[in-house]
Image (cartoon, rainbow, N blue to C red):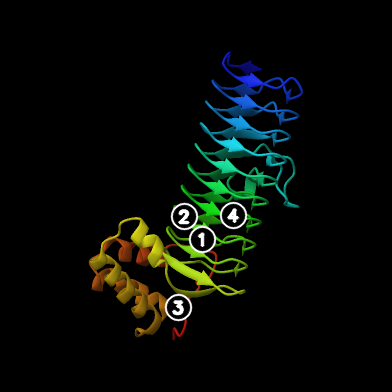
Amino acid sequence: MSIHGTAVIHPSAVIDDGAVIGPDCQIGPFCVVGEEVTLQRGVTLKSHAVVTGWTEIGEETTIWPFASVGEVPQDLKFKGERTKLIVGARCRIREGATLNTGTEGGGGITQVGDDCLLMTGVHIGHDAIIGNRVVMANNVAIAGHCHIGDDVVIGGLSGIHQFVRIGRGAIIGAVTMVTNDVIPYGLVQAPRGELDGLNLVGLKRRGVSRPEITQLRAAFQMLAQGEGTFHDRAERLAEDFDAPHVREISEFILAATDRSFLTPKGAK
């Protein structure tokens, strides 16, 4: 066990031998910290939080009561292999959230980036890779092997099917089931997940210029109504538009994936 001298630990907390507690950490009443856990500088565990497994928690992350972080995967194929969970810096993991370690078959690591907000009841399944500045509202469920890009927002009570990729800057409306890949900057809503446009509000908030947003809208229209298959249209995007965000969409669609894509409404 390694506990920095500046850490503040409530007498009722249970810290297993082998845990590493960094400077300025605060561990509240009735928390449990497992033997293979590392808490970086300034991590705060509110009361009744459990951090276990081979788990690293980044600087200044806060974990609220009754969250379970680093437990074994909910996967029948898991046979007790040593796998890991990595949580980035300055994340906020709210009450009742659950984050599982990876599986050997899925790469062995579940990872959450920096500055993420996981609201009450969020679940992050095994081998999921979550980018930076991702916001998940109450009771969002991320299945195993999903890849969620930077700056994604997912509305409450939504579910993301295993192996789905959601591109950077996309937004998923509340109470939505997403079973196919979502292009970067896409806007998805409706119970079964329909690609209904672009996340224009998010683009403007991130300072994307008006000319580039105009090109993005034209590119989206091409994806919806252009000639050829969806894959053919994606190949032409980078040729027809000189805009980094459009190229990002094209590269995302043309990359290897285990799922189909949500396509724009009215796409042929």
Task: Please report the residue visible at 58 percent of the width from the left and 24 percent of the height from the top.
Answer: 25
- Alpha carbon of mark 3 to alpha carbon of mark 1: how far? 16 Å
Position of residue 190 measured from the top left corner of the image (x, y, whole percent): 58, 75
Mark 2 closeness class: few <14, some 14–19, many ≥20 residues within 10 Å: many
Query: For the view shown, which residue lies furthest in the top direction?
Result: 5
Q: Nearer the viewer, residue 79 or 250?
A: 250
In the depicted view, which residue is nearer to us: 169 or 244? 169
- Return the residue at label 4: 145
Q: Residue at x 54, y 64 (%)?
A: 258
Coordinates of residue 135 in the picture (x, y in percent): 52, 53
Q: Residue beneath label 3, please?
A: 264
Residue 60 vertical position relative to residue 257 in the rendered view, above or below: above
Q: Tell me the residue at 36%/75% (across/down).
A: 220
Coordinates of residue 115 in the picture (x, y in percent): 48, 43
Determine whether 165 is above or below 36 in the image.
below
Helix or strand or loop: what does disc 1 sit on? Answer: strand
